Amino acid sequence: MEKRKIQKVGESTLSVSLPKEWLSNTGVKVGDTVYLDYGKDGSLRILSSSRPRKEEPSQYNIDCDYITDSYLLERLVVGSYMMGKDIVRIHSSKRITGEQIEEVRNMARRLVGLSILEESKNEIVLQCTIDATKLNTYSLLGRMSVIVSTMLSESLEALLQLNAELAKDVIKREEEANNVYWLITRLLLSAKTEGASDEPDPNGVLADIDTRLISKSLERVADCSESIAKIVLELREYGSTLDGNESEKMVPLEKLTKDLFQKSMDALLSGNLNKANQAINLRIKLDSELEAWTRVVALPNFRAIAIMLAMIAENSTIIASVAINNEMKKSDSFPASPQLF
């Protein structure tokens, strides 16, 4: 990053000189008009044109001749999408196999804004048409938190009731949570992020690293909720039931887990340090309750549920910790503002 000093010109005008290299690259000369773009974070961009120059689409090439493992192609497509590539070109000197074509089509259906542009026996071209300037990662985090909150609540309800239909709904929603996570990651990692919507959240813009950490934690909570839902289906398949004693012991665990997650998200969205601290304290209580519960349960499935609840607690605590750190960046004292409490 280059530093330039502000200079005074005349009685009331301040100016800053433009770098010679930038002038050479853009072709701007004396007498030309430049355009100023104000960022909501206090930044100021100088554009040589009212319309940004159209850049060549970024591209990632995949040679199927070197792919021998199942799902590797699928993961390469996801990876290129998250890296912000505009075009993914998949080719083979022989023929793209039916299994590989299905992997590509599956991801084209799932990834937001990705579609098949061309397809032949030797080549498939994917194109992403997302306009990053119209998307905001904070809004996407809010959307993802609603999906994950619903998954968590319904998976625990399905567990208490051994409700197979509710469990199946949770499993279906996991794909939607992944799609939003991949989209958030694309916006953060893509070079286009600089031109993305810069609308801040009500309590200050989250740093990219915080947004990435939160979205990953939400994605893990979604995975754990899906795992609980799958355990419910296994219990139903083998005719297992929860007796009154087991169900009674499960209720406080279910409530603590939901409260912990909700308090963490509320703390993040409202900037309330007390709620964030309460969430972390709830994790200590939940860990203690889970440890006591695992000593008395016999079924391996129940122990697996305990592990999933512990992982949900861990990732909820990460969100609460980010909420605390984000608020502390805004002030050098506590309390910073009476209305937060």
Image (cartoon, rainbow, N blue to C red):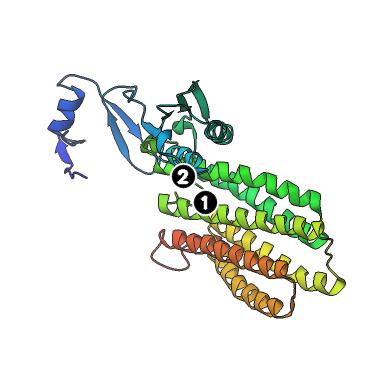
The vertical placement of 224 against 144, above or below, is below
**Front-lying residue, 242 or 45:** 242
**Residue found at the far right of this picture:** 244
Q: Earlier in the sequence, mark 2 or mark 1?
A: 2
Q: The residue tagged with tag 2: helix, strand or loop?
A: helix
Q: Amino acid at mark 2?
A: Thr
Q: Residue 161 at what x, y percent from top left?
A: 82, 59
Q: Residue 197 at what x, y percent from top left?
A: 45, 36
Q: Which residue is mark 2?
A: 185
Q: Which residue is mark 1?
A: 215
Rendering quarter of residue 193: top left
Q: Is residue 22 left or right of residue 124?
A: left
Note whether residue 341 is visible. Answer: no
**Front-lying residue, 311 or 44:** 311
Q: Is residue 261 left or right of residue 44?
A: right
Quadrant occupied by the C terminus: bottom right
Q: How many marks?
A: 2
Note whether residue 154 is visible. Answer: yes
Rendering quarter of residue 54: top left
Quadrant occupied by the N terminus: top left
